[in-house]
């Protein structure tokens, strides 16, 4: 692992459980309008593929509100 003095904290992640199928994932806010989601790679076929995949998702309600505010400007 890299020297901790060189690391930049992006966000804290919390364990979550999917309401759909009960699978676990990690989630945390990156900005007031974006969330980072880390999911297990369920399609992994070899050791050369990642164990987890990170995604960034816009907060639905906040993103819609921000878009409406931008339209007013």
Image (tube, grey):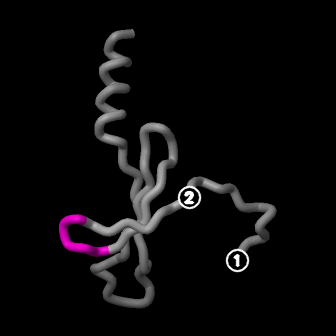
Judging from the image, what secondary structure is the residue with disc 1 in? loop
| Residue behind mark 2 | 12
Q: Which mark is residue 67?
A: none
| Residue behind mark 1 | 1
Q: Position of residue 26 (x, y in %)?
A: 43, 66
Q: Residue furthest left?
A: 20
Considering the image in quadrants, where does the C terminus appear?
top left
Nearer the observer, 24 or 1: 24
Considering the image in quadrants, where does the N terminus appear?
bottom right
Magenta-drawn stretch contains 67: no
Residue 44 appears in the figure: yes
Determine the residue positioned at 33% across, 25% down: 67
Vertically, is 69 above or below 26?
above
Q: Position of residue 45 (x, y in %)?
A: 31, 88
Q: Position of residue 63 (x, y in %)?
A: 34, 34
Alpha carbon separation for disc pair 1 and 2: 18 Å
Determine the residue positioned at 43% across, 89% down: 47
Judging from the image, what secondary structure is the residue with disc 2 in? loop
Identify the magenta region.
Answer: 19-23
Nearer the observer, 50 or 12: 12
């Amino acid at each position: 692992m890299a020297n901790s003095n060189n690391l930049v904290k992006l966000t804290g992640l919390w364990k979550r459980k999917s309401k759909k199928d009960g699978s676990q994932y990690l989630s945390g806010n990156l900005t007031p309008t974006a969330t980072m989601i880390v999911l297990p790679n369920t399609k992994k076929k070899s050791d050369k593929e990642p164990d987890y995949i990170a995604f960034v998702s816009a907060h639905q309600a906040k993103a819609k509100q921000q878009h409406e505010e931008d339209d007013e400007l």
